[in-house]
Image (cartoon, grey):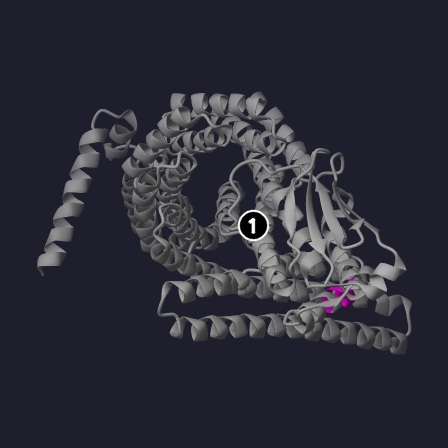
Amino acid sequence: MLKSGTFLLFLVLACLEIFAQNQADPLWKVWQNSALQDTQRLRAIQQLAYKYVPNQPDSARLLAEIQQKFAIENNLPAWEAKALNIIGLSYRMQSNYASALEKYKQSLILLKKTGDRNTMSAVYGNMGDIYRLQSNFPKAIECILNSLTLAEETGDKKKTADAYVSIATIYYEESENNSKSLEYLLKARELYELLGDKQGLTLVYGNLSSIYLDEQDNDKALYLLEKTLGFQQSMNDDHGAATSLYNRGVVYTTLGRYADAFADLKQATAIFQNIRDLEGLADALNAIGNLRLEQKQYSAAIEVCRDALLMSRDLSSYSITEMESCLCLSTAYNQSGQYRRALAYLQQYNEVKDSLQKQETLQTLKKMELARKSATDSLGREKERFHIEMEHQHAMREKNKLLVWFLVIGLLILIIALGFWIRMLYYQRRVNKLKAHSDNLEKQHLLYEIALLRSQVNPHFLFNSLSILSSLVRTNPDLSEQFIEQLSRSYRYILEQKEQSMVSLRTEIEFILAYFFLLKIRFEDKIELQINLTDNLLDNRKIAPLTLQLLIENAVKHNRMSKKMPLLVQVREFDSDNLVVENNLQPRPGPIVSTGLGLQNIVSRYALLSDKPVWAGETERGTFAVKIPYL
């Protein structure tokens, strides 16, 4: 009873505070005037609630719930749907994505009954935004295309431009396709300028700044961020201003302008805290922690990253923010000489990373299942047309052939996923066994090396490969068959050769050609591979397995690539005792979440296998080279 009474008192006080703030607002006075028409009063309170969404989402939600209750009592489902949309927006501003999606879906059910296509377009756009934030890009695209279709049908240029921005954002986040993203952003800017929409232009400029950061044009990116921040401050958009300050602080950190970076990040932290955006606050604290690491202020880094870690754990079971906090703490403790704590946080980092990878695997398999069902539905419609032109028996043969293909592809995907899962479990058991025998500092260092080994085979490559495969099966069956063969060959080699101490150079090169075929499908003309080795070397020299794969993966992870500036990787003979793997240096902008495990693992393995050291570093030609001794 005490808790219920306290909550009721809090709710009454919150209502009184909002009502006191609104007494002088003309919209509130319209709502309070019961002599006016219901639609006029509902329109007023809806506009008032929408004003509160960016900076006071709790207040916006309370006003929208008043609107919803009135609409239900007076049997006005269209206005109830609009209230649910605003409630969903308020949850989205507080990073409560599950509650936001629930309200949007309830709103859509009502809108489909009332036929309000204009509001339906807005709700689909808002749902697409949530799915994008959750990295569920197929669902995000589906919702945004629905929003775009409805906006074009109703002639709503504002929602059309909003859809363009959303599509541009997904191209940027999913495939780093800057040219397509730029194309849609320019379309959106043209419409926003025609409408004089400052909020829309803010979105465009913010996204353009991200593209120019990728192109390493920091001056233009900072100019656009400044322009974006000016719009947001003029509109009193606290959430948007905090996000821009955070982005600018990260850029300043990259440029070494630490005082400017700290000022922006401190201001962003205060705003996120004021509007109770805990996810944004945790990200800002992590950014300050990384800034302190750059300044070698390890105690200060530990303090803010610990706060970020506690906050991220309150938000969800596992998250990228929590992973970044653990990595920050591990690095700070390691640099401070506190190796036990550094190891403990590194282990937590790996646990969070493994959990996220498992979740991503499940999500990827769900996406593939949806794609398979969609492809099956499309195939059924094609068969109906085919029946009219061809004999029934021929149609049945084609159907059986396609079903066999789907079965084979599905089995191969399941086998690969199962094999990878078994391998992950094997490494987990291996680490746990070693942890039981670690009772002194030397054994703790050994455990640290085993923990590093777990991160060698990057699962994101498998997830990206499966995503590409799901598209190829529908568009290019012949190429998808080649893709499956090379993917199977690559992971068969990884599973069979990982525990071997050495393999022939020819065996490793054959694996690299299969592995690079997959990279070529993904990046097209953005990456090139040159191998200059004689048959005598291929047949008579040996190296540690997966050495070349780890180095090529390392080059892809740390370097930008485009058609104009492709990433070139060369494998050639250095002298009679060594070969060299070399790539042109095109560093990615901004901090990259990485522990440098691939190269360190190669160095450690060769230290056990040979007296000849591995050498790595930048060359006078402006490239990055790694010299590998023959075994």
- The residue closer to the viewer here, 614 or 135, is 614
Q: Residues within 10 Å of mark 1 (few under 14, many from 20)?
A: many
Query: Which image quarter: residue 598?
Result: bottom right
The location of residue 364, given as percent across then percent down, is 58, 62
Examine the structure image and report whether residue 487 is included in the region drawn in magenta: yes
Looking at this view, name the residue that lies furthest to the front. 611
Q: Would residue 213 be found to the left or right of residue 235 on screen?
A: right
User: In the rendered image of this protein, does residue 117 appear above or below residue 471?
Assistant: above
- Residue 161 quadrant: top right
Above or below, comparing residue 550 to residue 539 in the picture: above
Q: Mark 1: which secondary structure?
A: helix
Residue 402 in view in this figure = yes
**Position in image of residue 418 (x %, y %):** 60, 74
- Closest to the observer: 79 or 630? 630
Numbered range of the magenta stretch: 483-488
Residue 47 covered by magenta stretch? no
234 shown above or below 567 = above
Report the magenta stretch's main SS: helix
Q: Which residue is mark 1?
A: 140
